[in-house]
Image: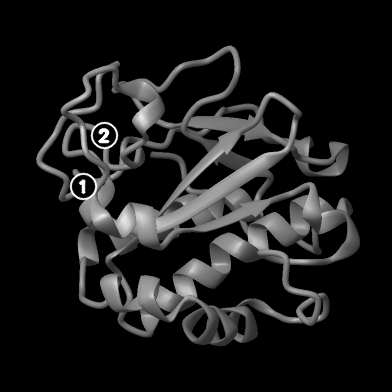
Amino acid sequence: MTLLAPVAGRHPVPPVRRSVRVLRMLSELHIAGFQRLRAMPYLAGTGAWRCEIAPASVFHRNHGGLLWNPAFYHSGNDVAPRELMDVSAKYTSASALDGSYFDWDDASKDDARTLAAKFVNRFASLCRLGEGWDHEYAGWFLRAVGLAERGWMMSMFDEYSPPSLAGVGLLDVRPEVWKQGETERPLLPLPPPGELQQDRIL
């Protein structure tokens, strides 16, 4: 694996910068002991980057980056896990244009750690489900955050690219100055299996 040098400066595009901050917020939550919280980032048909945060118990065992979604199942016997029906947090980069996170109107100036503190208070039920240690996932997620800070935003799927068991897709949102001297596209393997005892149909 090629080691990457740190990038100097912040990303010049505010929605990208704030989306990276959401990933860093989740890393702060992992540090605080909520490592059973996972992220499912994806690119919506509108072009917005979205990120859903939910407990590991609703992420599939064959693809630990995909959470249970009734849209992918056609059997009337499929019942949504209670925690997914009750609690999940959804972020979209479309809201980042005005500096908001999760529809909060008081977080435009917050750093990742402050966002994490607000997240624990405002998504208390979700965080209770996310309590616990999962060093394997937290370590994998740190790699994903490092790539995002370099302009490679992970996306589990988009309108034209379905989920894959071969790895996680990376969106190249680097400004031109960051591309100088870097020719190798990084790879991000799948996260560790989720706890949902059901495979995602791919």
In the image, farthest residue toward the front: 76
Q: Residues within 10 Å of mark 1 (few under 14, many from 20)?
A: many
Which label was assigned to residue 63? 2
Image quadrant of residue 80?
Answer: top left
| Left or right of 18, for residue 91 | left
Do labels 1 and 2 touch, CB within 8 Å? yes
Position above or below: 115 against 199: below
Q: What residue is at 75 percent from the left and 28 percent from the top?
A: 46
In the image, farthest residue toward the left: 197
Q: Position of residue 104 (x, y in %)?
A: 73, 73
Under tag 1, what secondary structure? loop
Q: Earlier in the sequence, mark 1 or mark 2?
A: 2
Q: Position of residue 128 (x, y in %)?
A: 30, 78
Residue 140 visible within the image: no
| Left or right of 93, for residue 53 | left
Under tag 2, what secondary structure? loop
What's the amino acid at mark 2? His
* Residue assigned mark 1: 194
Instruction: Please give the count of numbered marks on the rendered protein.
Output: 2
**124 or 183: which is nearer to us?**
124
